Amino acid sequence: MTLLNGILVQGHQVASRASKDYPYGTLEKQIPFFKSRGLDLNSFFNGTLNIDISPYTFKLIKPEFTFQHVEWTDLHPPEDFSFSRCKVIYENIEYDGWVYYPHPQTKLRHFQNPSLLEVIAIPVPKIKYEDEVQVLVNPDEIEIVIPYNKEME
């Protein structure tokens, strides 16, 4: 497993609650579609932890699950999603989770920073924005991209 340090940051706040674009939380609507395709997220928190791993970025290379053409809403075209099992470490306690990756080429709204890992996890007590967290990811499924540093030449 690859250990990443990160900071919990505020996301678009559409995964867990209604917004001006969606009259519901997006995960609430998506989870039944994921379950019907083999991934049951019902025991996880109904929202995402947005973990900034900058200056690093990541690339999914062989995620455990990829679901294509998920028609979870009539507000926009179907989306593709990938998931890779992970662990969130907060205050020295590990919480099971999944890196949640809505594919940018099918996600028409809410541009995501390439240094932001979205994680669906077991509820993490007392966690709040700006807290330091660690994430364990599977290097066979997620490649961590080290930023180019001209000074190191």
Image: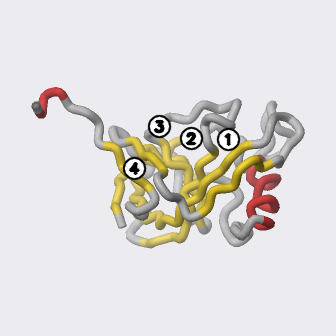
Which of labels 3 and 2 is toward the front? 3
Q: In the visual, does 19 lie left or right of 8?
A: right
* Residue closest to the far top: 150
Residue 134 bears which disc, if any?
none
Q: How far from the left and from the top, in percent, is residue 151?
A: 13, 28
Label located before the other in sequence (3 or 2): 2
Which residue type carries mark 1? Gln
- Which residue lies under the disc numbered 2? 10
Which residue type carries mark 3? Pro
Residue sitting at x 50%, y 48%: 117
Q: Residues within 10 Å of mark 4 (few under 14, many from 20)?
A: many
Residue 13 bears which disc, if any?
1
Q: How far from the left and from the top, in percent, is residue 51?
A: 48, 48
Whether pointer 2 and pointer 4 mark residues with C-beta atoms closer than 8 Å, the reply is: no
Q: Quadrant of the N terminus?
A: bottom left
Residue 114 bears which disc, if any?
3
